């Protein structure tokens, strides 16, 4: 199954994607994760993407479309995949439609005040990528023991920017995919396990 996860930053796309890929045995393709790795490794793509990401702006469409096109051509994607954070603009969605047929689009709906709480308190392990929230009171990564850090784009000014960018550039995709009969709305403000169950039901996989 080829699945797209839509939703504003902080909606829980990454967290839910991990649960769903384990259940469906398909790879997760997170453009944000691929770009952050490229920045860490100082590749040409990483160097190009860095300033956009730190400001909370979108990386140019041609860069992310190329990343996704290359990634889904790999053998582990032949039985499907979950796109987490792509497409994020209409041109990206239109480009995707020229080389792939998507089966379902899950739209995670979360009110703005909860998004801001989640993003501003999010902490990430710099070594292994484990993601948590200050509300959980963890002082280091419970998986590998490394320090927990705040993503630069989770700083207040970037968060504000990212939510505005979402409203202007990504929200139109809701109508785009609804018009194709692919959109399934899921309440992303429920407890984690309930959201996972609702997604599996929406996908017909429960
Ligand atoms: P994420 O981890 O999905 O929140 O993505 C982090 C950042 O990576 C975004 O704020 C963008 O700067 C960049 N990014 C990720 N996916 C895309 C995309 N599909 N199009 C443009 N920029 C992206």
Image (cartoon, rainbow, N blue to C red):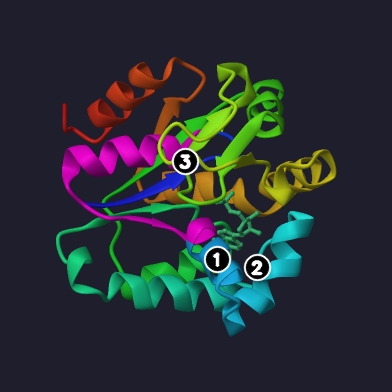
User: Of marks 3 and 1, which one's residue comes earlier in the chain?
Assistant: 1
The reply to whether discs 2 and 1 touch (Cβ–Cβ < 8 Å) is yes
Q: Which residue is label 2 attached to?
A: 59
User: Can see residue 57?
Assistant: no
Name the residue that disc number 3 marks. Answer: 130
Q: Within the magenta stretch, is there residue 28?
A: yes
Residue at image point 30% right, 57% down: 102
Q: Vertical placement of 203 versus 134: above or below?
A: below
**Residue at 16 percent of width and 26 percent of height:** 206
Q: Is mark 1 within 8 Å of ligand 1?
A: yes
In percent of width and height, residue 139 lies at: 60, 27
Q: Earlier in the sequence, mark 2 or mark 3?
A: 2
Q: Which residue is mark 1?
A: 35
Q: Tell me the CA gap for discs 3 and 1.
A: 16 Å
Query: 168 or 194: which is nearer to us?
Result: 194
The secondary structure that dominates the magenta segment is helix
Please check the rendered image and state whether residue 153 is part of the magenta-colored stretch, yes or no: no
| Residue at (52% x, 44% y) in the render | 174
On the image, the x and y values in percent for residue 46 come to: 61, 74
**Mark 2 near ligand 1 (CB under 8 Å)?**
yes
Question: Where residue 47 sits in the image (x, y, percent)?
Answer: 67, 77
Q: Is residue 111 visible?
A: yes
Of residues 117 and 8, the one nearer the viewer is 117
**Quarter of the view holding residue 39:** bottom right
Q: Which contiguous range is marked in magenta?
A: 12-33
Secondary structure category for the residue under label 1? helix
């Amino acid at each position: 199954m080829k699945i797209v996860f839509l939703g504003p930053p902080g909606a829980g796309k990454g967290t839910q994607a991990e649960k769903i890929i384990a259940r469906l045995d398909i790879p997760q393709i997170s453009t944000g994760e691929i770009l952050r790795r490229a920045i860490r490794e100082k590749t040409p793509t990483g160097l190009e993407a860095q300033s956009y990401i730190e400001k909370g702006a979108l990386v140019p469409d041609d860069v992310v479309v190329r990343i996704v096109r290359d990634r889904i051509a790999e053998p582990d994607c032949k039985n499907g995949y979950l796109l987490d954070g792509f497409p994020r603009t209409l041109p990206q969605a239109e480009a995707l439609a020229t080389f792939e047929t998507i089966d379902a689009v899950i739209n995670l709906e979360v009110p703005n005040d909860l998004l801001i709480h989640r993003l501003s308190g999010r902490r990430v392990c710099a070594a292994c990528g484990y993601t948590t929230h200050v509300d959980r009171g963890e002082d280091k990564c419970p998986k590998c023991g490394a320090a927990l850090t705040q993503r630069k784009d989770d700083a207040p000014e970037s968060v504000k920017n990212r939510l505005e960018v979402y409203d202007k550039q990504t929200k139109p995709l809701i109508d785009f995919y609804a018009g194709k009969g692919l959109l399934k709305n899921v309440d992303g403000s429920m407890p984690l396990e309930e959201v996972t169950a609702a997604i599996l039901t929406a996908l017909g996989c429960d």
